[in-house]
Amino acid sequence: MADIKWVGSHIEVKPPKKPKKITGTRLAAIFGLNKWNTPFKTWCEITKTYQEPFEDTKFTLAGKAIEPKQAEFMKKSYAMFGLRTPTDEFGEDYFSKTYGDFFPKNKHFGGMWDYLDTDDDGKVTTVLEMKTTQRSEDWEKDIPEYYAIQAALYAYLLGVDDVVMVASFLEPKDYDHPENYKVSVENTITVPFKVSERYPNFPQMIADAEQWWKDHVDTGISPDFDEKADADILKELRKNSLNPDTDVAKLIEEGEALQAELDEAGKTIEKQKKRLEAIKKQVKEHLQTQFRDGDTKTEIKGTGYVWCLSRSTSTKLDEDRLKADGLYEKYSTTEPSYRMTVSKIKEEK
């Protein structure tokens, strides 16, 4: 995690030498149009300040399993026989070969498209973006904006105007066995659009994103965070980096809640702790009698624990004699030490 300086409602870090690119989902987030992401969280990802570890879920696994079925559906239903996959373009194990970026020549924008349609000459004509979801309500009126912008960016970078969104709607049971899912007109919709018509100002959006990059990525100065929307990531950042102006109160609040829980739990186990200490003392006395010359430890194995007593020797200085000889003060140093205690505030009677 990067060294962080907290300044008001934003943070500052040393600008990264190799930041991540603005992908389709990140572009929407920069403009505040991604309901699952925020400009601040996106900045943290791009600058590598912090990123949540990726783990496949039943939703991502279903998407991977059903996406090829969607492509076959498009070939048969819409005669898109020129469909090309990332494997067709970059070969097997394309993710490792491209590092997840199909646009290496672009300095700030990148990402991975799903499928491309081509004409008889092999020229790219259309970008297809495949989605699987059980939230059909999100698609009732229009394509979710963050998905549309994602596909529009890849079309823009490829120099084409046509996009087709393909969305298959799943039932909860479909996530258990996505390999059995059959894509059909009953469960799948296609929504075409032209980038120039849906986003006539898309070049300006790209310019605005470039300016956002200059303002925030090149400088290492984040956009403002939102305590509610960015709560999870702020909690992670504050674990290792404290803002003394605003974060101490939050840490005290969290710490007091934890301390209260521990205090309450401590009451219920105090008797057990005292009895255990008495047992340990008796076992220790017994183990001490078991040492032979040259032994460094003795032990007794129980059913779930090993009770072990180790023995070592150490050299101890005779402070009284050193003081008598006038050497103690000459060769001793004084260093500060700190001990913090947390105790419950007593209620006034």
Image: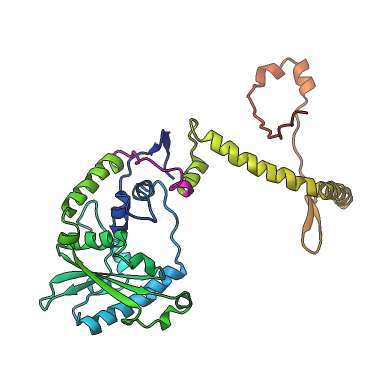
* Whole-percent x, y for residue 206 in the image: 20, 51
Range of the magenta residues?
219-232
Residue drawn at the location 26% of the way across and 59% of the way down: 149
Q: Is residue 220 magenta?
A: yes
Which of the 4 image quarters holds residue 343?
top right
Closer to the camera in the image, 214 or 254? 254
Residue drawn at the location 71% of the way across and 19% of the way down: 328
Side of 203 where 214 appears, left or right: right
* Whole-percent x, y for residue 34 in the image: 34, 55
Residue drawn at the location 44% of the way across and 66% of the way down: 56
* Whole-percent x, y for residue 219 in the image: 30, 38
Side of 340 where 160 appears, left or right: left
Which of the 4 image quarters holds residue 90?
bottom left
Closer to the camera in the image, 133 or 12? 133
* Whole-percent x, y for residue 232 in the image: 48, 49
State the scheme by which the image is colored.
Answer: rainbow
Which image quadrant: the N terminus? top left
Magenta-highlighted stretch: main secondary structure? loop
Above or below for 192 versus 273: below
Q: Residue at the front extreme?
A: 141
Residue drawn at the location 30% of the way across and 41% of the way down: 216
Closer to the camera in the image, 11 or 96? 11
Q: Is residue 4 magenta?
A: no
- Residue 60 seen by the camera: yes
- Residue 310 seen by the camera: no
